[in-house]
């Protein structure tokens, strides 16, 4: 047997094997490289859709479930309100008050216009914060808050002021949640970016949308006969007008459109 010939055959065989293994290695490397390139992050998806957002909290936030019950206003409560008359004789969970002397608003309304009135003439007025002014309905709405966090769209915790053609406050109606208690220990909630991802996946964030405000509040999770359970809720203001809500514990999108709203008298 020709040893030199055998040695040459082995060398050629190993060279072919090495070339094959090198080819397979390059193929796998290119595939992994392609996967890394094509697997875009959620932030990159937002960039691709030209969706922008304000600076988000970077630290982990903890919150808890709350419970509260609607207050039943009494004659003693009403007696504290000077310069006002109750529309209904019987006390209830909603006050309907007429001002004996209309209160003039400035031509360009600012929440500060009602700050003193809320403090001096409305029960628990310092526990509400401005929500919106509706020029079509001629109403100004305030939401009750808990520890500076608003209670979103809660008909049992809001004030609606009514103004006339002369831009004067003439009446208001009020509801109030009392006995607020923390039901659970504080736990970490969903990061706001994760909640934004939920909205994006559901198609609620349109391309070129701008998230102009992000805040944490509470919304009703369970409505019981005499009380309710409140869950921490992310609110995202989009394009300075639309509000989108996500349960900050469970990640469900909350739709208030079909909820009952406090009627405007």
Image (cartoon, rainbow, N blue to C red):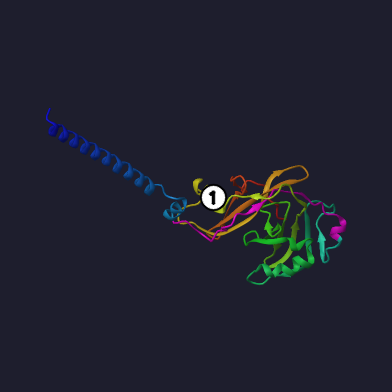
Q: Quadrant of the C terminus?
A: bottom right
Which region of the structure is painted magenta? 50-78
Residue marked by disc 1: 194
- Residue count near mark 1 (Cα–Cα under 10 Å), binned few <14, some 14–19, many ≥20: some
Which image quarter: residue 151?
bottom right
Q: Number of numbered discs present?
A: 1
**Residue 20 position within the rendered picture, expressed as x and y whole percent measured from the top left:** 25, 38
Residue at 75% of width from left, 57% of height from top?
Answer: 174
Which type of secondary structure does the marked residue at label 1 adopt? helix
181 and 16: which is toward the camera: 16
As for residue 65 lying within the magenta part, the answer is: yes
Res 166 seen here: no
238 and 248: which is toward the camera: 248
**Residue 46 position within the rendered picture, expressed as x and y whole percent measured from the top left:** 46, 53
* Vertical order, 169 against 50 (above or below): below
The residue furthest top is 1
- Position of 240 compared to 80: left or right? left
**Residue 11 position within the rendered picture, expressed as x and y whole percent measured from the top left:** 19, 37
**Residue 176 position within the rendered picture, expressed as x and y whole percent measured from the top left:** 76, 54
- Position of 108 compared to 81: left or right? left
189 and 99: which is toward the camera: 189
Q: Quadrant of the N terminus?
A: top left
As for residue 129 lying within the magenta part, the answer is: no
The residue furthest bottom is 106
Res 169 seen here: yes
């Amino acid at each position: 047997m020709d040893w030199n010939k055998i040695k040459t055959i082995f060398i050629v065989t190993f060279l072919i094997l090495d070339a094959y293994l090198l080819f397979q290695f390059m193929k796998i490397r290119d595939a992994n490289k392609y996967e890394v390139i094509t697997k875009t992050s959620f932030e990159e998806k937002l960039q691709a859709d030209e969706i922008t957002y304000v600076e988000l909290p970077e630290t982990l936030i903890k919150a808890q479930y709350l419970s509260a019950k609607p207050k039943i206003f009494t004659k003693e409560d009403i007696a504290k309100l000077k310069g006002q008359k109750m529309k209904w004789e019987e006390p209830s969970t909603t006050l309907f008050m007429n001002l004996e002397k209309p209160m003039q608003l400035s031509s360009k309304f600012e929440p500060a216009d009602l700050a003193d009135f809320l403090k001096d003439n409305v029960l628990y007025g310092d526990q509400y914060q401005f929500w919106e002014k509706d020029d079509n309905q001629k109403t100004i709405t305030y939401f009750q808050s808990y520890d500076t966090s608003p209670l979103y769209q809660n008909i049992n915790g809001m004030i609606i002021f009514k103004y006339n053609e002369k831009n004067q406050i003439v009446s208001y109606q009020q509801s109030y949640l009392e006995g607020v208690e923390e039901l659970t220990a504080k736990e970490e909630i969903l990061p706001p970016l994760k909640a934004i991802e939920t909205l994006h996946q559901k198609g609620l964030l349109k391309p070129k949308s701008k998230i102009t405000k992000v805040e944490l509040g509470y919304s009703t999770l369970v409505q019981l006969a005499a009380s309710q359970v409140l869950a921490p809720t992310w609110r995202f203001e989009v394009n300075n007008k639309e509000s989108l809500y996500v349960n900050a514990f469970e990640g469900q999108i909350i739709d208030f459109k079909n909820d009952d709203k406090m009627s405007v008298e």
